[in-house]
Every structure is written in C-alpha cells, then in structure tokens.
Image: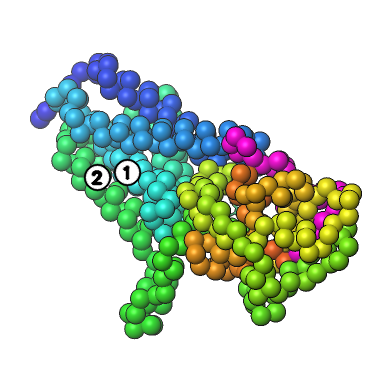
C-alpha cells in the first residue's frame, strides 16, 4: 500500500497559482456581474469598456492558468483530492469556451452566443458554489475521511486532458444543440433554414424591451414628424426612401460592452426632416418614439444634426431586419447603442427634452463614448 506523502507546504509556483486563481475568480465574477446587471452597470457606464477589456484579459489568464497543470510541476507522489481538480477543470473549460464564443462577436451567430451567454453564467454559478464549499472545508480544517466520496489521485496529465476534453465537448454541445431548431429542420424535411442575408452583421442578440419585436408593415407605415413645427408631415416608407440618402460606416457600441465593427448604415439625415417641417425658433430638442410603444429617445437639436447621425432604413446594404428596427431606426454613431432607437414611428421637435427609456433608469442622456 502506498503511503500518503507527508503534508508539507506546496511548491511555491503552485501556491502562487492557487492564490492567483482565487483573486482572479473573484475579479472575474465582479466584473462579469457589473457588465450583466443594469442596476450596477448604469453607474459604471464610463468604465464599462474598460471593465469589459479587463474581464477578457482576466479570462484569458484564467484560461492559461487552467493549462498550467499540463506542465507537470507537482512533486511526484503528491496526491490530490480528485474533486479539487476535476471540478475546476470540468467547469472552468466550458466557462472559458463560452466566454470565447461571446467575445468573438462577429464570428459566431447570435443563437449560439445567446446560449453561450446563459451557460457562461450558470457554469460560473456552479463553479463559484463549489469554490465556496471547498474554501469552507479548507478553512474549517474538515478533511472528509471517506476515500470513496473524496478519493485522492495522482495529478496525471492524461486524466487532466480527458476532463478538459469532456468540459470542452459539453460546452460545444450546449451551445450548438437546439432541440427546437432540429425539430423544425426535421419538419421542413431537412432543408436549410433561411439564413441571415449575406453581409448582414449579426448582433449578440437583438434588443427589445417589450415582448418580441414589433412587426411593422411597410405599406401602412407612417413616420409622424411633428411638434413645434410649421408643417407637420406623415411620411410613407417610400417617401422616406426617396429623400436624399446618406451613408455612414461606424462601429456600433453598446454600454454592456459588446460592439460590432464597421456597420454601414444608409438613411436620411435629420436636416431633411427639418427642411420639410420647419421647426419653430425655440426648438432645442428632438424626441423619438418607437413603434414598440415603450422606447423613447431624445437628442439636442444640435446633436441630431451632427453629420454622422441618421434615420437608417438599411444596414450593410439590405433593408433592416424586423429585429434591427424595420422600417426605420435612429443611428447615433458617436453615442452608446441605447440612443439608437429602433422602429421609429414619430419624430417630434420641441423646446424641452423628454427622458429617454434608459435615461429613465439612470443612463446619461449625453451618451458619448469616445472623443467627439
Ligand atoms: N425600440 C428599441 N430600440 C432600441 C433598443 C430596444 O430595446 N428597443 N435597445 C437599444 C440598445 S441598448 C442597443 S445596444 C441597440 C441594439 O441594436 P440591435 O438590437 O440592432 O443590436 O438598440 C437600441 N435601440
Ligand atoms: Mo445597448
């Protein structure tokens, strides 16, 4: 029978690794939660891009620290409780993989990323719970006696890799496996589903604050342009498209951290509407209303007339998808995405501002994210 090696101190590199893992896990959870929970991140808006980058950087180091045991640094014969390495590796691996899927915004489709997002959170909750249990056992000095429940094993590369592969496989299955979609595919006789039109960038998930995406019929759609103006008008979709068009290629940046590079918008500059309706001299603000009945936005007249701001009906060369705000959305490239209200049905010129949807929850009305 093999004797347990004496309980001494761990070799230094491993002790550092362990301490680092604790600190980084806490920081990862804190930064992740502040990116995820609006209640927290609305106070942190100026720092969100920084937090986002920090989260990714910490995640990458965490990924590398997972790999360290593959370089065998544990003294020979040192036996470790099985769960002390199976659990972190089994959960850590899919957390890293789902994190990568989320990070590579323009590589993976929205459906995969939204599942990855959910699993990223749930797996972290599982690992976090286990870490708390582990910490409690260690700190309280309770050493489970049962060899069956708490076996000790050699720190062995092959087993380690096998656990990692299991975690990776799990991550791939849960992020690509969608029983409902498979069922639909079977019903269609295996024919592929209509894909997102070529060239259309896929966003992490299309945002809506109501239940679903408003379905607006282009034939009956009217853009109401009114307020303190000489001549209110109601424009049809065709009339909008006949107005002189402008193009604008910009990065799209949400406060929650994700962004989509080089989105090409086509639409109408607000000066066109100003020419049509002739706002009164006391007008300082422009109000925007969404066809979802809930979302509103507000810009200073001067901001609305910035050359980069437009009411867009096309993205990357195709009409907006319903989820993207068909038939018309505002695009304010220099400000965070929440200013870019979708399904715009009414534009109103006024002397006073209104509180936009997210501004109502505390987001700043001046949502510039970089140098102007
Ligand atoms: N009507 C409406 N407009 C909206 C939103 C929304 O939920 N409803 N979300 C906003 C936010 S927070 C962002 S980041 C962008 C996202 O645009 P997308 O859904 O086309 O990616 O739309 C903005 N406009
Ligand atoms: Mo956003």
Query: Is residue 54 visible in the rendered structure shown here?
Result: yes
Does the segment drawn in magenta span residue 358?
Answer: yes
Residue position for label 2: 163
Q: Marks 1 and 2: CB-CB under 8 Å?
A: yes
Residue position for label 1: 93
Residue 87 horizontal/vertical position (percent)? 33, 41
- Which residue is drawn at the image coordinates 33% and 36% (left, top)? 63
Look at the numbered disc 1 and give the secondary structure of its residue. helix
Q: Residues in magenta?
A: 346-372
Q: In terms of image quadrants, where is residue 326?
A: bottom right
Residue 318 horizontal/vertical position (percent)? 51, 67
In this rendering, the answer to whether 76 lies above or below 125 is above
Relative to 93, is 199 on the left or the right?
A: right
Residue 338 horizontal/vertical position (percent)? 64, 50
Relative to 77, is 189 on the left or the right?
A: right
145 or 130: nearer the viewer: 130
């Amino acid at each position: 029978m093999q004797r347990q090696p004496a309980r001494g101190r761990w070799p230094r590199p491993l002790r550092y690794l362990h301490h680092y893992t604790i600190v980084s896990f806490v920081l990862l959870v804190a930064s992740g939660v502040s990116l995820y929970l609006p209640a927290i991140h609305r106070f942190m808006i100026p720092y969100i891009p920084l937090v986002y980058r920090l989260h990714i950087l910490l995640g990458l180091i965490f990924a590398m620290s997972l790999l360290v045991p593959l370089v065998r640094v544990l003294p020979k014969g040192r036996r470790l409780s099985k769960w002390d390495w199976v659990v972190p590796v089994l959960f850590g691996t899919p957390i890293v993989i789902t994190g990568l899927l989320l990070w590579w915004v323009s590589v993976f489709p929205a459906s995969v990323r939204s599942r990855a997002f959910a699993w990223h959170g749930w797996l972290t909750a599982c690992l976090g719970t286990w870490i708390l249990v582990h910490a409690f056992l260690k700190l309280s000095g309770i050493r489970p006696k049962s060899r069956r429940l708490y076996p000790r094993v050699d720190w062995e590369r092959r087993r380690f890799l096998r656990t990692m592969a299991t975690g990776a496989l799990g991550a791939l299955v849960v992020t690509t496996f969608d029983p409902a979609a498979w069922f639909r595919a079977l019903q269609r006789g295996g024919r592929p589903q209509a894909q997102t039109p070529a060239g259309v960038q896929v966003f992490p998930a299309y945002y809506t604050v109501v239940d679903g995406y408003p379905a607006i019929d282009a034939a009956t759609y009217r853009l109401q342009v009114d307020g303190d103006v000489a001549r209110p008008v109601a424009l049809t979709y065709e009339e909008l498209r006949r107005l002189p068009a402008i193009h604008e290629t910009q990065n799209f940046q949400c406060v929650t951290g994700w962004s989509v590079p080089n989105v090409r918008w086509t639409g109408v500059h607000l000066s066109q509407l100003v020419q049509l309706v002739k706002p009164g001299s006391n007008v300082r603000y422009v109000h925007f209303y969404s066809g979802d009945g809930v979302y509103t936005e507000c810009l200073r007249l001067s901001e609305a007339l910035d050359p980069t701001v437009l009411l867009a009906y096309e993205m990357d060369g195709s009409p907006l998808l319903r989820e993207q705000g068909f038939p018309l959305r505002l695009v304010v490239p220099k400000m965070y995405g929440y200013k870019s209200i979708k399904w715009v049905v009414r534009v109103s010129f006024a002397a006073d501002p209104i509180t936009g949807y997210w501004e109502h929850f505390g987001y700043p009305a001046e949502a510039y994210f970089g140098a102007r």
